[in-house]
Image (tube, grey):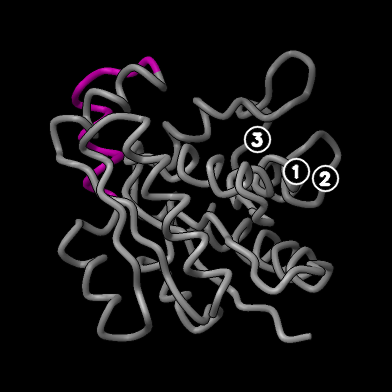
């Protein structure tokens, strides 16, 4: 059976995970690349060993797990650091993603993928869902979620594609837009309506 592969993307702190959670609630198989990223950087993993070889043990916590805030700081320091980290982790993450997609037994799978546009990964999917929100809410959510300064939050946001760039995806593939400027209840209603439509494709 051919599985319909749907990319769920959007800016950091716009609500991808929350939307993905609703899709799971309604019966969808949802694969989260952030979760895969954590899986492939566990202690003694290939991904973590490769990072240590470049950046040293300063990226480790006392229990030898990855110190994610420290790695984030290193990533934000220079474009070279970002490129190195992405070249190490992205192939491992995408390989694991493909393995998980191949095991899906339903008619569709939703993959929560933050950097779909930035890394030109649209070719891996049949459709896309973009979750959007206004910049004020995005900044507020990000600062609260990661307990970071406004400047750091703005740096993280500016490192990604902007909303206008993401919306150009609709010229490449069938794309649904979910607006997350309102309440959680509104997001859930939009999620259920869209998922029921996708089930019928």
The residue labelled by disc 1 is 39
Q: Label 3: how many residues lie within 10 Å, few (<14), some (14-19) or many (20+)?
A: few
At label 2, counting other C-alpha atoms closer than 10 Å, the crowd grade (few under 14, some 14-19, many 20 or more) is few
- Contact (Cβ within 8 Å) of mark 3 with mark 2: no
Instruction: Quadrant for residue 99, please give it.
Output: bottom right
Q: Is 21 in the magenta?
A: no
x and y percent of residue 40 in the render?
74, 48
Q: Identify the residue at horizontal 55%, vertical 75% (top origin).
A: 200
Q: Which residue is mark 3?
A: 56
Q: Earlier in the sequence, mark 1 or mark 3?
A: 1
Judge whether residue 150 is colored magenta.
Answer: yes
Q: Which mark is residue 45?
A: 2
User: In the displayed structure, does residue 119 sit left or right of residue 49?
Assistant: left
| Vertical position of residue 27 compared to residue 134: above or below | below
Relative to 162, is 85 on the left or the right?
right
The region drawn magenta spans 147-159
Q: Nearer the viewer, residue 184 or 43?
A: 184
Q: Residues within 10 Å of mark 1 (few under 14, many from 20)?
A: some
Query: Could you tell me which quadrant the C terminus lies in?
Result: bottom right
**What is the distance, in whole Å, between disc 1 and disc 3 at their CAs?**
20 Å
């Amino acid at each position: 059976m051919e599985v319909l592969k749907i990319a769920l993307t959007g800016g950091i702190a716009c609500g991808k995970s929350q939307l993905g959670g609703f899709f799971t609630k309604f019966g969808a198989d949802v694969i989260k690349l952030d979760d895969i990223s954590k899986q492939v950087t566990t202690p003694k993993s290939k991904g973590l060993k490769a990072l240590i070889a470049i950046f040293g043990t300063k990226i480790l916590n006392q229990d030898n797990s990855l110190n994610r805030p420290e790695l984030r700081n290193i990533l934000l320091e220079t474009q070279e650091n970002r490129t190195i980290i992405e070249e190490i982790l992205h192939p491992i993450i995408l390989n694991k993603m493909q393995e998980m997609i191949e095991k899906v037994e339903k008619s569709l799978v939703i993959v929560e993928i933050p950097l779909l546009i930035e890394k030109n990964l649209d070719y891996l999917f049949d459709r896309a869902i973009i979750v959007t929100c206004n910049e004020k809410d995005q900044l507020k959510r990000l600062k609260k979620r990661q307990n970071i300064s406004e400047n750091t939050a703005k740096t993280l946001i500016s490192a990604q594609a902007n909303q206008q760039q993401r919306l150009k995806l609709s010229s490449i593939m069938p794309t649904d837009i979910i607006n997350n400027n309102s309440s959680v209840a509104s997001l859930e209603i939009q999620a259920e309506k869209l998922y029921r439509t996708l089930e019928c494709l």
